[in-house]
Amino acid sequence: MNDRRLEGIIGQLLRAGVLLAAAIVTAGGVSYLVQHHADPVNYRTFAAGGQNVRTLPGIVASAARFDSEGLIQFGLLLLIATPVARVAIALVGFALERDRLYTVVSLTVLMILALSLIRAI
Amino acid sequence: MTALEFTVAVWALSALAGFLGALTGLGGGVVVVPALTLALGVDIKYAIGASLVSVIATSSGAAAAYVREGFSNIRIGMFLEIATTIGAVVGALLAGRIGTHALAIVFGLVLIQSAFYSFKATPGSELPVESDALGRRLRLGGNYPVDGKREEYGARNVRTGFGIMFGAGALSGLLGIGSGAVKVIAMDRFMRIPFKVSTTTSNFMIGVTAAASAGVYLSRGYIEPPVAMPVMLGVLGGALVGTKVLVHARVRTLRIVFGVVILALAIEMIVNGLSGRI
């Protein structure tokens, strides 16, 4: 497996992930508008939402109930996962090439990403 | 404003931002945030949360096209991502500590830099260089297509590039933007990597950098579903159309117009930040 082929696979995978994420966000958005289209909205002052939109377990649970905001957030989570998957696949690719230096580099990036995402658990 | 009106307005603004961002190579984030805060009065924290998500969408969505062209360099990208992701986490943590007014002012200053980049960004005309010692040790060199054949290039000043990338990551995490312009400057001007390789590798890196702040943004509640939904769909749609149109557009004129718009937004952001209206 050479670098070019590896990158090609990664590129296709990313695009598929983005399209799936966009489809889920659209579904959630349509459901949200059907229920709330006439409600007045105001986002002038920041107030953090509940656990159902801020933590991984909360988002998964509310998406499983087909809650509209939960679905949107689940689609966005999937989107956030696409670059993470990209790093993970590159890690495997470098490991298969026995490229020790870049296996370690990819692992370092993956760990930094994990450290950030772990806050949302 | 009702939820429907808000969604349509945000979607339209975001689609325009994504379209212009793709045409000029600056990305949608730099326009989406001021558009939402200035035109619709959205709190800047919601705006940067939604923008960050759209940055990931355009970066991952365009990756397949860029890879096909054979310009991006996965080793350079991965190595420099160590710097951008650490920077992004630091920036995202800082975003929660500094006030809204200060965020608006910093955003305005970054917009001014983007405007100048838009006015004068020209591909570095210098020839590809040989790697220096560190560039060689990290195997950052590669080859890219020039007139049908592949030409070798190297990378120099790795330490400086790495340092600037940390700054690019911090700005991305602080403001919810891709900071592609800074990434390109680090690779093209400082590491002497060919312009085309720099821009496509930068696009690849933007998504990973943004993902590093996403966890912090999500847990803080900056990613609010009714705001992020139309922004993500709008910017992604606009960017897809923009990439298709790019081939036929008169990019030079467009960059100047876009630069003027960004400069106006920059002044507006700074004035509003100073007067405490944002």
Image (tube, helix red, strand yellow):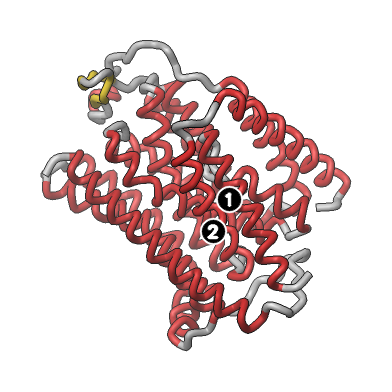
Instruction: Work out whether residue B227 or residue B97 is closer to the camera in this orientation and state it.
Output: B227
Query: Residue furthest toward the right?
Result: B275
Is residue B25 placed above or below B223 in the rendered structure? above
Q: Which of the chains bears the disc numbered 1?
A: B
What chain letter is assigned to the residue under label 2? Answer: B
Say the numbered circle drawn on residue B232. Answer: 2
Position of residue B276 in the picture relative to residue A1 (left or right): right
- In front here: A108 or B51? B51
Disc on the earlier residue, 1 or 2: 1
Occupied quadrant, residue A77:
bottom left
Secondary structure at numbered mark 1: loop
Residue B50 falls left or right of residue B2: left
- Is residue A118 something that shows in the picture? no
Percent across and percent down for residue A118 are: 43, 66
Residue at image coords 55%, 68%: B219
CB under 8 Å between discs 1 and 2: no
Q: Judge whether B182 appears above or below A80 on screen.
A: above
Q: Which residue is mark 1?
A: B176
